[in-house]
Amino acid sequence: GPVAETFRVIQGAMSEEYVRTTQGVFQFELSGDEGGTWHIDLKSKGGSAGFGKPPVTADVVMSMSSADFVKMFTGKLKPTLAFMSGKLRIKGNMTLAIKLEKML
């Protein structure tokens, strides 16, 4: 589905440089189609992204619908706007959340 595909693209776009400069682990709690727990690990060597809890404790937990997640990662929904309108809830390290937004 679209969420799995998005994480596949993220995994493919990962580089050691992103891991080195970000040093953060992001957990996504998605609702709706393909809902559940997904992660982007930009702290462990090589990084990883996919379904399930991250291999290490998340620095940032973001909750949103799977539809909004796909829109956000395809550039159709600005993360700041999603957050301001209540579509995106963020717990944890806001500085890292902003770093992830820059990476998008």
Image (cartoon, rainbow, N blue to C red):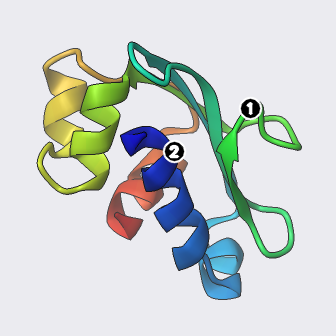
Question: Cα distance, mark 1 to mark 2?
Answer: 11 Å
Q: Nearer the viewer, mark 1 or mark 2?
A: 2
**In the structure shown, which secondary structural element does the residue marked by tag 2 occupy?**
helix
From the image, tell me which residue sits under label 2: 4
Among the 4 quarters of the image, the one containing residue 81: top left
Q: Secondary structure at mark 1?
A: loop
Circle 1 residues within 10 Å: few <14, some 14–19, many ≥20: some
Q: Is residue 38 visible?
A: yes
Point out residue 92 in the picture as x, y percentages from the top left corner. Answer: 59, 29
Q: Position of residue 47 (x, y in %)?
A: 74, 67
- Determine the residue positioned at 60% across, 66% down: 11
Residue 3 image position (x, y, % from top left): 43, 40
Could you say which is closer to the camera, residue 67 or residue 102? 67
Residue at the spot x=11%, y=49% of the render?
76
Residue 22 in the image: state x and y as whole percent: 61, 67
Q: Which mark is residue 52?
A: 1
| Residue shown at the point (52%, 77%) measured from the top left | 13
Give the residue type at disc 1: Gly
Q: Residue at x 83, y 35 (%)?
A: 57
Tell me if residue 26 can be seen: no
Q: Earlier in the sequence, mark 1 or mark 2?
A: 2
Q: Which of the 4 image quadrants contains residue 31?
A: top left
Q: Relative to 27, is 68 on the left or the right?
A: left
